[in-house]
Image (cartoon, rainbow, N blue to C red):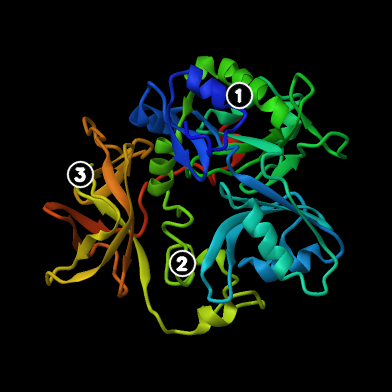
Amino acid sequence: MGTDLKTTPLNSWHRQSGANMASFGGYDMPLWYDTGVKKEHLAVLESAGLFDTSHMACVMVTGPDALSLLDYCHTRDLSGLKQGRCTYGAILNEKGHVIDDAIVYNFGPETFMVCVNAGMGGAVTSHFMAHKQSWTATVEDLTDQVAKVDIQGKNSARILSKILRDPDTVFSAMPYFSFKGHFLKDTDQPVRLMDGTDVLLSRSGYTGEFGFEIFVATDSVVALWENLLAAGKEYDLIPCGLGSRDSLRAGAGLPLSHQDIGERKFVNHPWMFALAMAEDGKGFTKDFLGKEALLDSGDAHFTVPFVGETLRKVGTGPDTQVIDANGDSIGMVLTCATDMGIGLHEGRILSIASPDLPEGFKVKGLSCGFLLVDRQLQPGEKLVLRENKRKINVAVAEDIRPHRTARLKITNFTG
């Protein structure tokens, strides 16, 4: 391990458990364990998987004008964000380029938390401070002061219920993108584990599947991790690395910051819901940093999802070209992963969760991801991705992995 890499509090556990480690976002992180990416990916789709996400950073924004500051610096209209709810969007610069994507949590009228990606806590804090204007708000970078683990998959609540105090109350009225509790003690409505540990439990994640993100004090995360694995043994819960996290998020149609979004305008992509769009789609409902740049129609580019015909992949970046039906190069590959839980049947994408899987049909996995191209493409349009002599046939997709569970009612998973 390089001496310049940061570690999460679970680093020793990962290494002692034989994880294949690599640098990600400045942290020494597990890519996969002995189980392998395929099994870890399928565990989330079939039961549950556990991820160390303590490399991500939290920024607290408090004070009378905390909402005003965040509403200006975040692409979502936060004025309607209720206490106990969170929302996804992006933080842009004046050019309309993405500094990072972020989830904003509303703890109350003057208290918000912003969860950003690995190594971005300092940059986002500085960005907020640079645009604070005359607003009265305090911005605090909590990088490495809060740990986080994600439990994802249909059995997540059942496993959590074994280590939570009063799980029925915790899980009641808990829709997608809501949260309860706090990682600090002495909160008004705590969520506590059986051992007394305070946690912030968020019904969210990065896999497209039902599950939770759990924020906790750094000195409590190892016990939380081990208790979850013990509680989940009967459900075949396994630790999962960043390899399966990447393939799951790609199949769920979710972007990777600084890869699928980044140094280009945050427009013409599958995540337009993350912008405060007017109903007519021609403007915005609020003023925010980068707004004018997004309204400028110059520098047109389009990000589209794709699905391959097999599980074969190609590399990413400018060296992998997107070729249209006329043989012209129209762009490059941003993400190319393999979702092991999907397959093609008579031209239709099915997942292992599809209720109408044909008898005898075996899901073998398909490549999928995102392309950056110079024109608008339609779902179903055939393309070739070419990396030197390697070629794969793909089609533009409206969506990738069907029958995802993230948005289903919690009552589907607590019985």
Residue positioned 63% across, 26% down in the render: 160
Disc 1 marks which amino acid? Trp
Residue 131 image position (x, y, % from top left): 71, 71
Disc 3 marks which amino acid? Thr
Q: Quadrant of residue 299?
A: bottom left
Contact, mark 2 vs mark 1 (Cβ under 8 Å):
no
Q: Which residue is mark 2?
A: 263
Residue 305 image position (x, y, % from top left): 34, 58
As drawn, the residue found furthest toward the front would be: 3
Vertically, is 238 above or below 298? above
Q: Quadrant of residue 320?
A: bottom left
Q: Which residue is mark 3?
A: 310
Image mark for residue 288: none
Mark 1 packing: few (<14 Cα in 10 Å), some, or many (20+)? many
Q: Is residue 87 visible?
A: no
Mark 1 falls on what kind of element? helix
Is residue 394 found left or right of 123 in the rendered image?
left
Residue sitting nearer the eye, 203 or 8: 8
Mark 2 packing: few (<14 Cα in 10 Å), some, or many (20+)? some
Residue positioned 75% across, 57% down in the render: 82
Residue 319 image position (x, y, % from top left): 24, 59
Image mark for residue 225: 1
Q: Is residue 228 visible?
A: yes
Disc 2 marks which amino acid? Glu
Mark 3 falls on what kind of element? loop
Mark 2 falls on what kind of element? loop
Q: Earlier in the sequence, mark 2 or mark 1?
A: 1
Q: Earlier in the sequence, mark 3 or mark 1?
A: 1
